[in-house]
C-alpha cells in the first residue's frame, strides 16, 4: 500500500518502508480530476503546481499525441504546446501527465529533472512499486477462460486515442495462469469500453487468431458456438465476418494499426513519406484523431485500404502457434510485440533440401547431407520475422516455447551493465575467441559491460557459467550427443539446476537440442546449429553475431545477418524468443544497409530500420540529397555519387550488405 505524505516543499509517496519518491513542488495544491495514465499503477494523485522536480533517476519523456520519445540532454530545453507523459524509473516508478509549454532542466544529479510552467498547471501523477510480482490473470483452462483473458489484455493500453499505435503508449499484458476452480465469467481486468466486440466460436484456434486484433482494439470477446467469427461495433453499424479468422483478423489489424499510425503522425504535424496516403484515402487526420475507436474502425473500413497497403511496412512479426492451453501462456508476450497468430502448417524437409537451401542462398550448387535434427518447412505468411510455437523444428523461423517468454524477466537493457561470458573449450577455435573478446571490449565504451573470458572448462565449471546471472554466454567448442564438450566429458544442459544465462550462442556442431534445453532451464533465447559446421565458418558467424548483438540488434535479426557471412548459413538457427534484444534500446533500433553499384559510377544505398519492438514509430534519415522521415519497417533508398556515398557512410557504424555479403559500413566505404 502506498501512502501520500505532504512535506514542506512538496510531497512524498512511499510504501512505509524504505521505498519512496520525494516530489518537490513548493506551490503544490492537491485536488482536481486525475487524467489518463498507464493503467498499471498502485496509486494516483492530481493537483496543481507551477514547478515540479524529481530526484536523479533515469527518465523518459513521451509526447502523448504521437507516442514519440523526446530525448532529454543535460541542460535546459523547452517543450511546446501539447500533452506529455514522463516516466521516472525508481523503487517507486513515477508517471507524470502534464500539458506544455514547459521548461525542462535535466541534470542527472539532484534534483535530477525539473519542470517549470508559465503558470500553475493541472498535473496527474501515478506511482507503481517496481519490485511487486508480475501482474497475473488467472482463468480456467477452457476456451471461456482464455476468452476472458484475451479480452482483459486490451486494458494494457495507456489511451484509447490513435496514440495507442505508438509502443510507448502500450504496456505488456499481464501474465496468464490457469486454475480450474476459477469462474470464467468474472472479468479479470477492467478495460475500456470501446464499443467493439468480437464474436467467435469456443475454439482455441479461432481465439488465438483473433487475440492480436482484440488486444489492439480493446475489443470485448463473446463466445457463440453457432456463429461465423465476426467483429461488431453496433453504435457505428459495423458488422464484418472473419471467415478465415487468421487471415482476416491479421488483415484488419494491419488496416486499423497503420491508419492509426498515419492519423496520429499527421494530426500532430509529424509528417512522414507515408502520411500523404491519407489524402489518397480521403481521411482527415485531425478530425479522425478525435474519434473513438469504434468510429475510427468505421472510417477505416469505408476506405480502399488495398490502394495504399503496398506503401506501408511489412508486418514485423508472424507467429505460428499450436492452439493449446499451455501455449496460451505465451499470448501476452506475442501480443506485446503485436505479432500475428497463424495456425502452424508445414511439410517435411530432408537433409538434402536443407543443404540445398543453405547453398542456394549464396548461389552455390546442390550436395548431399544429413540434418542433425528433423526440420520442417513452415508455410510462412507475410512478416519480416517468423516464430514457431508448435511441434517440429522449422527452417527460416525461430523455434520457441512458452518457457522462453516466462523466462523473459527484467533485463539489463537500456542502461545497466551487461554481463558477458566468453568460453573457449576448443583450442582450434582460439581465433574466434580472440576476435569476439576484442569486439565486446571495444563495444564496452558505448554499452557498459563486464566481459569474462574462460578457457578449457570442466563440466562443473561450465555449469557454473550457465547457472550464474549473465546477459549473454558465448560458448565456442564442440557439442556431442551427451552435451557440450568439456575437459572432463560433456555437460548436458538438461542437467543444470537452472540456466541464468539470459541469452547464449552455442557455436558448436549440432547444438540445437542443447540450446532448446537451456531455454527450458531458464534462458530466454540463443543461437544454435542444426548440423556440423567448419571451424572457420563458425568463427566468421560467431564474430559477426557478437558485433551485431552488442550493436543493438535483436537476436533473430542479428543471426539472420551474421549467417550471410558463410555459404552454410542456414545451418544456424534461433531457439527461444527471437525478438529479444541483448544490448541497446529496444525502441531505438539500429539500421542495416544495402550498398550496390548503380549506373554512371553512382552508388545506391538502402537504409533499413525495421524493428519489432519499435513497431509504429518513425525514423529520420539525413543524406546529401535531403532529409527523409519514414515509418520504421519502410526502407529509404538513395542514389548518390561515389563521393557523397563515402561521406554518408563515414557518419555511420552499421552492418552493410555489399556484393551480396555482410560487411561493416567503414569497410564498405574504403572499397567504394
Image (cartoon, rainbow, N blue to C red):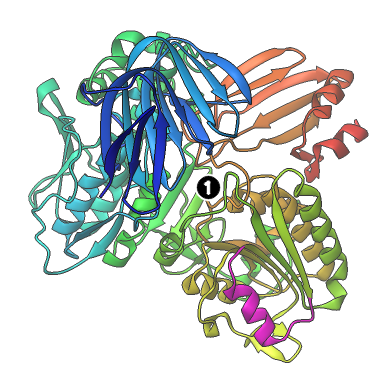
Q: Would residue 482 appear left or right of 389 to someone viewing this image?
A: right
Q: Is residue 462 magenta?
A: yes
- Tag 1 residue: 385
Determine the image quadrant of residue 450.
bottom right
Residue 65 % position (x, y)? 39, 19
- Look at the picture and state if 356 lies above or below 511: above
Q: In this orientation, which residue lies closer to the viewer: 599 or 323?
A: 323
Determine the image quadrant of residue 597.
top right
Q: Is residue 3 magenta?
A: no
**Can you see residue 284?**
no
Q: Residue furthest bottom?
A: 488
Residue 383 % position (x, y)? 49, 42
Residue occupying image coordinates x 47% and y 45%:
317
Residue 27 % position (x, y)? 35, 18
Residue occupying image coordinates x 46% and y 69%:
392
Q: In this orientation, which residue lies closer to the viewer: 531 or 517?
A: 517
Residue occupying image coordinates x 80% and y 23%:
648
Q: Residue furthest front?
A: 8
Numbered disc 1: secondary structure: strand
Residue occupying image coordinates x 50% and y 57%:
577
Q: Which residues are magenta?
A: 455-470
Which image quarter holds the C terminus?
top right
**Can you see residue 538?**
yes
- Look at the picture and state if 325 lies above or below 464: above
Determine the image quadrant of residue 74.
top right
Amino acid at each position: 500500500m502506498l501512502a501520500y505524505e505532504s512535506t514542506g516543499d512538496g510531497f512524498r509517496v512511499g510504501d512505509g518502508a524504505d521505498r519512496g519518491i520525494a516530489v518537490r513542488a513548493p506551490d503544490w495544491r492537491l485536488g482536481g480530476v486525475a487524467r489518463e495514465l498507464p493503467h498499471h499503477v498502485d496509486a494516483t494523485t492530481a493537483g496543481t503546481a507551477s514547478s515540479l522536480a524529481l530526484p536523479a533517476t533515469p527518465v523518459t519523456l513521451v509526447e502523448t499525441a504521437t507516442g514519440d520519445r523526446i530525448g532529454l540532454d543535460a541542460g535546459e530545453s523547452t517543450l511546446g504546446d501539447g500533452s506529455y507523459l514522463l516516466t521516472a524509473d525508481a523503487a517507486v516508478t513515477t508517471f507524470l501527465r502534464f500539458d506544455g509549454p514547459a521548461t525542462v532542466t535535466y541534470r542527472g544529479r539532484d534534483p535530477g529533472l525539473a519542470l517549470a510552467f508559465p503558470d500553475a498547471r493541472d498535473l496527474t501523477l501515478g506511482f507503481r512499486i517496481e519490485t511487486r510480482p508480475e501482474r497475473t490473470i488467472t482463468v480456467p483452462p477452457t476456451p471461456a477462460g482464455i476468452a476472458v483473458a484475451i479480452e482483459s489484455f486490451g486494458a494494457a493500453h495507456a489511451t484509447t486515442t490513435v496514440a495507442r499505435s505508438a509502443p510507448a503508449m502500450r504496456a505488456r499484458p499481464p501474465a496468464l495462469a490457469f486454475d480450474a476452480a476459477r469462474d470464467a465469467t468474472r472479468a479479470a481486468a477492467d478495460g475500456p469500453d470501446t464499443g467493439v466486440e468480437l464474436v467467435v466460436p469456443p475454439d482455441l484456434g479461432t481465439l488465438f487468431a483473433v487475440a492480436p486484433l482484440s488486444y489492439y482494439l480493446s475489443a470485448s470477446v463473446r463466445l457463440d458456438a453457432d456463429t461465423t467469427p465476426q467483429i461488431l461495433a453496433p453504435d457505428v453499424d459495423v458488422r464484418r465476418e472473419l471467415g478465415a479468422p487468421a487471415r482476416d483478423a491479421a488483415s484488419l489489424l494491419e488496416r486499423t494499426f497503420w491508419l492509426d499510425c498515419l492519423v496520429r503522425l499527421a494530426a500532430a504535424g509529424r509528417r512522414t513519406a507515408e502520411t500523404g496516403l491519407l489524402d489518397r484515402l480521403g481521411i482527415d487526420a485531425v478530425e479522425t484523431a478525435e474519434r473513438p475507436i469504434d468510429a475510427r474502425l468505421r472510417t477505416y473500413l469505408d476506405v480502399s485500404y488495398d490502394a495504399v497497403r503496398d506503401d506501408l511496412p511489412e508486418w514485423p512479426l508472424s507467429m505460428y502457434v499450436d492452439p493449446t492451453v499451455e501455449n496460451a501462456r505465451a499470448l501476452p508476450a506475442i501480443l506485446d510485440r503485436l505479432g500475428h497468430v497463424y495456425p502452424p502448417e508445414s511439410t517435411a524437409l530432408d537433409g538434402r533440401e536443407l543443404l540445398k537451401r543453405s547453398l542456394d542462398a549464396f548461389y552455390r550448387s546442390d550436395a548431399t547431407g544429413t540434418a542433425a535434427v528433423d526440420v520442417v518447412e513452415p508455410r510462412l505468411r507475410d512478416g519480416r520475422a517468423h516464430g514457431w510455437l508448435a511441434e517440429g523444428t522449422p527452417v527460416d523461423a525461430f523455434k520457441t516455447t512458452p518457457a522462453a517468454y516466462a523466462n523473459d524477466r527484467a533485463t539489463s537493457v537500456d542502461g545497466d551493465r551487461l554481463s558477458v561470458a566468453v568460453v573457449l573449450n576448443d583450442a582450434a577455435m582460439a581465433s574466434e575467441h580472440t576476435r569476439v573478446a576484442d569486439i565486446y571490449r571495444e563495444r564496452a565504451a558505448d554499452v557498459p559491460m563486464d566481459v569474462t573470458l574462460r578457457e578449457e572448462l570442466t563440466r562443473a565449471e561450465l555449469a557454473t557459467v550457465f547457472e550464474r546471472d549473465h546477459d549473454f554466454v558465448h560458448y565456442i567448442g564442440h557439442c556431442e550427443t551427451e552435451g557440450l564438450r568439456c575437459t572432463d566429458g560433456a555437460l548436458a544442459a538438461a542437467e543444470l539446476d537452472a540456466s541464468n544465462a539470459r541469452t547464449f550462442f552455442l557455436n558448436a556442431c549440432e547444438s540445437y537440442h542443447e540450446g532448446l534445453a537451456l531455454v527450458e532451464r531458464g534462458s530466454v533465447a540463443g543461437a544454435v546449429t542444426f548440423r556440423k559446421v567448419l571451424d572457420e565458418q563458425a568463427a566468421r558467424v560467431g564474430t559477426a553475431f557478437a558485433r551485431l548483438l552488442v550493436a543493438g540488434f535483436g537476436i533473430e535479426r542479428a543471426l539472420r545477418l551474421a549467417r550471410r557471412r558463410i555459404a552454410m548459413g542456414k545451418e544456424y538457427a534461433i531457439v527461444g524468443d527471437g525478438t529479444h534484444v541483448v544490448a541497446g534500446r529496444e525502441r531505438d533500433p539500429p539500421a542495416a544497409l544495402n550498398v550496390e553499384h548503380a549506373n554512371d559510377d553512382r552508388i545506391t544505398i538502402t537504409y533499413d530500420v525495421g524493428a519489432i519492438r519499435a513497431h509504429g514509430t518513425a525514423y529520420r534519415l539525413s543524406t546529401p540529397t535531403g532529409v527523409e522521415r519514414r515509418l520504421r519497417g519502410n526502407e529509404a533508398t538513395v542514389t548518390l555519387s561515389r563521393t557523397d556515398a563515402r561521406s554518408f557512410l563515414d557518419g555511420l557504424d552499421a552492418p552493410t550488405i555489399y556484393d551480396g555479403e555482410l560487411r561493416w559500413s567503414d569497410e564498405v566505404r574504403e572499397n567504394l
